[in-house]
Image (cartoon, grey):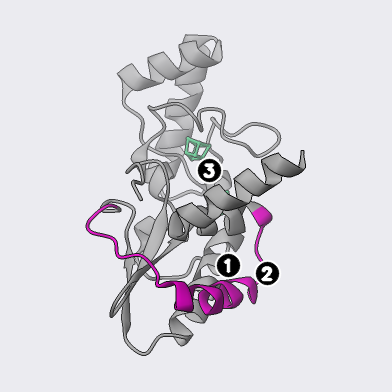
Amino acid sequence: MKIEPGKYLFSKIECRDYDILVPFSCRKTGTCCSVYVPRIPYDDLEVLVKYLGLPADEFIADYQFYYGKKLKGQAVRCPFLDNHNLCRIYHHSLRPWVCYLFPFSYGSEVIKTCPAHVEHHHLLDCLVAGEKECNVYDSSFCPNLDLRPIPEERWLGILKRFQSVPSLPELAVAFVIFNEPELMGELMAMRRSWE
Ligand code: SF4
Ligand code: SF4
């Protein structure tokens, strides 16, 4: 299947004869953004402030104040985080890459303050445990390089291992779409026929 680079974060479990893609799904707790201010170039700040309809001078001065504190090693709340702990520029193309890549930017280290990252690593451990030979990669930048489909006879076992870790329903849907797009097509067709 074709997965648009830059749209999702996911790991790839490269087994001997096939690949398993494991998507990452942020729980939107805002924990990471409550203690971090990303570097955003001035020109981008101007665009983002306009996009949000905020008073430019005031917001940019605030941003620079908080960014300065972050450079001094302080844990500072990002000024783009709203009162519901959601990023106000989450869907904007100028949201910094450092934000998009968190927590994968920390390599194989599990970020315990991020429930989605803990869940992701539980899933990886569980899926890897059923494989005799494999390697795990952060695959977000090279998703389409000759991915090998999971053989039909292996799919049910892999799905059962995935389901043994509690996860959000949307993550289970993404897991099926990534690994069994044809099955997902059939499920959607069945659902339409019930409606
Ligand atoms: S820009 Fe958005 S995603 Fe990045 S730290 Fe700020 S609130 Fe979080
Ligand atoms: S700590 Fe993890 S789950 Fe919470 S907002 Fe950050 S990336 Fe998402």
> Do the CB atoms of the residues marked 2 and 1 lie less than 8 Å apart?
yes
Q: Specify the farthest residue to the left.
A: 145
Alpha carbon distance from label 3 to label 1: 26 Å
Q: Amino acid at mark 3?
A: Val
Mark 3 falls on what kind of element?
loop
Residue found 36% across the figure and 35% down from its top: 39
Q: Which residues are magenta?
A: 144-169
Please state the horizontal and vertical placement of residue 133, each as a whole percent of the image: 32, 86
| Whether residue 79 is situated above or below residue 139 in the rendered picture | above
Residue found 54% across the figure and 30% down from its top: 80
Query: Which of 68 and 96 lies nearest the eye of the viewer?
Result: 96
Mark 1 falls on what kind of element?
helix
Residue 76's tag is 3
Of the image marks 2 and 3, the number of the one nearer the N terminus:
3
Residue 119's tag is 1
Q: Amino acid at mark 1?
A: Glu
Residue 177 in view in this figure = yes
Q: Amino acid at mark 2?
A: Pro
Residue found 46% across the figure and 20% down from its top: 61
> Do the CB atoms of the residues marked 3 and 1 lie less than 8 Å apart?
no
Mark 2 falls on what kind of element?
loop
Residue wearing tag 2? 166
Of the image marks 2 and 1, the number of the one nearer the N terminus:
1
